Amino acid sequence: MKLIKNRTNKIKRLNSGFTLVELMITVSIVGILASFAIPSFNEMIANNRLSALSNDLITDLYTARSEAIKKNIPVTICSSTDQASCANSTNWGTGWIIFKDVGVPGVVDGVDEILFIHQPPNNRLTLTSDRAFGRFLPSGFST
């Protein structure tokens, strides 16, 4: 802070920045506000990831139904841990596959062709269902 005299010999202050005390108070207030905001932000991110994963599953269910109608053969979507076979698990958070199911229902065997693979998410989400797989008939109905 500089002090200067003007024409009437009055002292006038020129502010050229913040004092150290003002800066410390501002930083501490920002820190306190951030400590309240970060947990809410983390919860919002987790909710958005779970929503995106469930929307991916719903989209792939529609895709499996559409492929069954289009190709006029049964198509199955199932949870998978290796993206090559069905896991027979109700945990869909490990990824899933969609395949032409002309052999044994719900099993990827030699005559089946994998159409789509959904990789597991990078985060530790758990998406469960009461069914390990869904099978769509050429009519579009599920069994």
Image: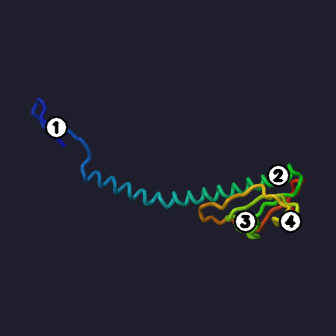
Name the one closer to the observer, 66 or 86: 86
Where is mark 3, residue-wise? 80
- Disc nearer the start of the sequence (4/1): 1
Quadrant of the rendered image containing residue 95: bottom right
- Disc nearer the start of the sequence (1/3): 1
**Which label sits on residue 12?**
1
Q: Which circle, 1 or 3, is nearer the viewer?
A: 3
* Percent coordinates x, y for residue 74 in the rendering: 87, 58
Circle 2 residues within 10 Å: few <14, some 14–19, many ≥20: many
- Disc nearer the start of the sequence (2/1): 1
Q: Amino acid at mark 3?
A: Ser
- Disc nearer the start of the sequence (2/4): 2
On screen, residue 141 versus residue 131, left or right, reads: right
Where is mark 4, residue-wise? 105
Residue drawn 9% across the image and 33% down it: 9
Where is mark 2, residue-wise? 67
Quadrant of the rendered image containing residue 127: bottom right
Q: Give the spatial CA distance, label 2 vs label 4.
A: 16 Å
Q: Amino acid at mark 1?
A: Lys
